[in-house]
Amino acid sequence: MGNRLSKIYTRTGDDGSTGLGDGTRTGKDSARVNAYGTVDELNSTIGMVLACELPAPVRELLTQVQHDLFDLGGELCIPGMAMVQDADVERLERELDTLNEPLPALKDFILPGGGMAAATCHLARTVCRRAERDAVALSRAESVRSEAIRYLNRLSDLLFVIARVLARASGHGEVLWQHERRKR
């Protein structure tokens, strides 16, 4: 393991810059910092989901995702680093298929809700979509591996399905969008 922080503040960022994992400095508002910062926010949001009562398999899956996101943040923080692999994306796809198979087919859009765990998972899904957009924006200017973007894309789908599972498990059920609620 690398250096441990014995002092949390360094004052080196007081000028609006921050150090990347390779030692270079960049602005705190750079696309790279924004991308890995949003991945960090996503990881924290998944931590909020984990603070809820969850079925054990979902808890284990989301804990693994948190580890993956820490790796992904490191990859985005260190230009040229490769941490997320095709196998990670494929694992998410397998989990997605397993969790989605018993759910009824969707005929309507689902509103965020369905109990605290499901609603928080929907929040994590939206943060994941933003992390994906930020990674894509970074890729327009600098190199970002396709595996990183695919991982975020697949994770947002997985979080949607997990939210559906949690809404049903909690007894709250899914909140369906009532598109015909307004008479024209």
Image (tube, helix red, strand yellow):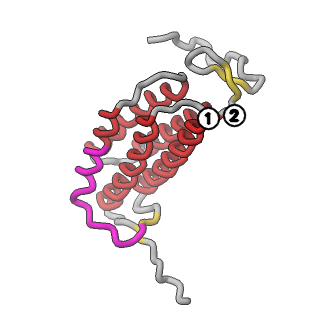
**Residue labelled with disc 1:** 141
Give the magenta-colored segment's residue range. 93-109
> What SS does tag 1 mark?
helix
Q: Is residue 146 left or right of residue 135?
A: left
Residue 134 on image: x %, y %: 57, 41
Whether residue 57 is situated above or below residue 19 in the rendered picture: below
Toward which corner of the image does residue 11 lie, by quadrant? Answer: top right
Tell me the distance, in whole angstroms, between the alpha carbons under discs 2 and 1: 14 Å
Residue type (three-letter) at the residue carrying disc 1? Ala
Residue at point 42% right, 43% down? 51
Task: Name the residue rendered at 54%, 39% in the picture.
Answer: 135
Q: Secondary structure at mark 2?
A: loop
- Front-most of residues 131 and 181: 131
Task: Specify whether residue 75 is painted magenta.
Answer: no
Numbered label attached to residue 29:
2
Residue ranking furthest to the bottom: 184
Please state the total of marks drawn on the protein image. Answer: 2
Nearer to us of marks 2 and 1 is 1
Q: Amino acid at mark 2?
A: Asp
- Given residues 176 and 85, the one toward you in this image is 85
Residue 107 included in the magenta stretch of the image: yes
Seen at 71% across and 24% down, the residue is 17
Which residue is rendered at x = 42% and y = 49% of the image? Answer: 156
Q: Vertical placement of 126 versus 173: above or below?
A: above
